[in-house]
Each structure stands twice: as structure tokens, then as C-alpha cells.
Image (spheres, rainbow, N blue to C red):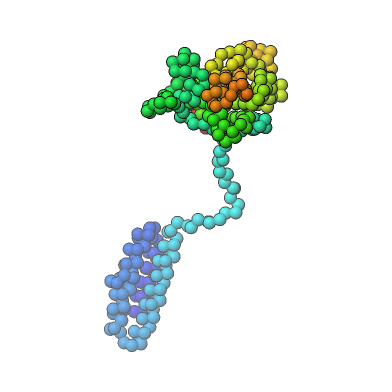
Amino acid sequence: MDAGNLLNLKNQALAVISEAETKKELSELKVKFLGRKGEVNQLLKNLSDLDPDQKAQTGRLLNEAKTAITQALRQKTLKLSPAPRDWLDVTAPGKTFPSGHLHPITQAIEEVSRIFERLGFTRVRYPEVDWDWYVFEALNMPEDHPARDEWETIFIDAEENKKMGKMVLTTHTSNGQVREMERAGKTLPGKTPIRMLNIGKCYRRQQDRTHTVMFHQFEGLVVDRHIGIPDLKGTLNHFAREFYGPKARSRIRPFNFRFTEPSFEVDFSCVHCLGRGCRFCKSGWHEVGGAGLVHPNVLKAGGLNPKVYSGFAFGWGIERCYTLKPGLNLDDIRLLYSSNLEFLNQF
Ligand code: DAH
């Protein structure tokens, strides 16, 4: 073995390493040249046959070749590895994360709450699953009374309570009336007034363009001494102006509800024609819900003396009154609960 042979080996190794195209090829080359039985080691074995001078020189050359091959392998391996990514590119445009917003009905609920809070109403919540007593019986609708048919009730498959009757999904937020009178009687005995705003989910067996099985209502209840119809009218007009704009008005028409006497239907003037009549409303008005002076039997059911106290109540659907707002021609309210982001993102 002479220095020429060694040089050949080194150059041959460097050439094939530089031409390798995969890491697999590189590891095969590593075994071929530097492995235990590789070419470099084969040459090393022959070192003992040489005389001491030659031995030292060839040993040095062999070591150089080994180092050169090792380095070439390392560099080529790096070249074949994917380039590490820049960890920070200060010129890259910023990423914006999609931000959500409250559901339009939640926004409407907040708006309705603010309007009544300014009049001194306190927002409360009563059960969504309630006893027949609070939903019907205590509201002057005894069992089997035909008025109950108006509320397409969904019953819960649960044991009946002797006093409270069956369990139902609340069909209206009026279930909060007697519950609120009981609460006021317990926490502030003899200190009624009540100014309640009960907002909650209601359920009825009805689903079409203008109804969803689950919907929201809000119920106002004011009980005090000397409460009368002018208080009710003032409250309704205040809501109309705040919710629909300064020119909006309300009107009440005689109607019949079992839990109020007298009872009314409540209309708001159309936001498009302000009551004159147009293609959208026909008559100039939109009916939204009911109201009236609390029936003496309901006051009694809530533990209040009708000779001392009187009150008014009103209630209607959030979805209904929200979709009458200016610019919101929604002819199918089921869209509100469709989880369709293209629709919801507009609000
Ligand atoms: N609870 C009635 C309904 O769901 C609406 C209503 C009518 C509420 C008259 C009232 C009221 O408070 O006084 O149709």
C-alpha cells in the first residue's frame, strides 16, 4: 500500500459522496468506507506489515482520509436534510383570528333588558320546566279550561304532583308571575312593589315560517298600590320608542286572557310607514303580544290581597318583536336557529 493508493481511495470516496442523492445512499457509503470492515479499516490492518517510518506516514495519511470522508458525509447529510424553517419572519403579514359575536336573539334580549332596567324593572329567570300550577292553574286557567288549548303544550313524562299537577315545558313566561309574587312576599313581606322582567325560553308544538318549537318571551309584571291602565300604556310606548325608534307608537285593543282583566292585544306601529299602512304591514300596525291588568284571582294565587294591590302585565316573543325592527325583513324565523353562519354573520 502506498500513498497513491490512499489518495485514490480518499478521492473516490469524496466523489461518490458528492454524487449521492439520498440519505440511504449516504449511510451505505459510510459503511463501505468507514465501517468496521470498510475500506479504511482494511488498509489500517495492513499497517503492521510496514516498516516504522512508512507506518507513521501512512498512518497519518489514513487518518486524514478518514477525517475528510467523515466530514464529507456529514456535510452531504446536512445538504440532503430539509432546510430548517425561519422561526421568525418579521415581515410576514399579521394573522387575524376569526372573532365571533353574540347571536342576534341574545343581542335582542340584552337590548330589551336595558330598556326595562332604565324603568326600574329587575330581570329574573324562572324554570323552563315548570308545574302546571304556575303555567296554567294559578293563572286562572283551571284544568280542562278550553283557553289552555291556545298553548300547544309539551308535557314532561314525570310523576304528577298532587298540588302542582303535571310538569310541562313552559309555554309562556307568564309562569313567572305567581312565582315572582311568592318571592316578593317571602323576601320583602308587605313591601311589594314588583317590577319584574322575566325573559326565558318557551316551548310549543308549532313549527313553521313564523314559529319555532323553542322561542323566547319576555314578561313584564308590575304590582303596587293604585296601578292602572295608564301605567301600562306609558310603559308600552316607552318600549316602542326605545326599541323601534322615536316615532314608533303602541296601541292596545280589547282581548281576552284568563289572567288579566281587562285584557288587551298589543300592537306596534309599522317601522316602514309609521302606522299609515303599507305593503309590509297592510294595516299600519303589527300585533306582538298580550297585556292587561292582573286578574284578582292571580294576585290571590300569589298571596297578595287584590283589595290592596293591583298590577299590570304584558308578554310577547323576542323573535317576533325583533324581526319587526327596521331593515330586518326576515320572512322565516327558523333561520335564526339554523346555525347557518352565512346568515348569522350579517348581524
Ligand atoms: N302569555 C301570553 C301568551 O303567551 C301573553 C300575555 C298576555 C302575557 C297577557 C301577559 C298578559 O302578561 O297580561 O300568549
Residue at the location (36% across, 75% down)? 6
Residue 49 in the image, given as x and y percentages of width and height: 28, 83
Residue at the location (33% across, 63% down)? 28
* Foreground residue among 110 and 271: 110
Question: Can you name the residue that lies furthest to the bottom here?
Answer: 52
Q: Is residue 119 visible?
A: yes
- How many discs mark residues in the rendered view? 0
Asked if residue 133 is positioned above or below residue 7 in the image, the reply reads above
Residue 297 in the image, given as x and y percentages of width and height: 54, 20
Residue at the location (38% across, 73% down)? 66
Residue 287 in the image, given as x and y percentages of width and height: 60, 17
* Foreground residue among 36 and 147: 147
Quadrant location of the C terminus in the rendered image: top right
Question: Can you name the residue that lies furthest to the right here?
Answer: 246
Q: Is residue 6 left or right of residue 119?
A: left
Q: Quadrant of residue 56?
A: bottom left
Q: Quadrant of residue 75?
A: bottom left
* Foreground residue among 81 and 193: 193
Q: Is residue 327 visible?
A: no
Q: Is residue 12 left or right of residue 37?
A: right
Q: Is residue 28 left or right of residue 212?
A: left
* Foreground residue among 106 and 67: 106
Residue 13 in the image, given as x and y percentages of width and height: 37, 68
Asked if residue 55 is positioned above or below residue 17 in the image, the reply reads below
Residue at the location (50% across, 23% down)? 138
Quadrant location of the N terminus in the rendered image: bottom left
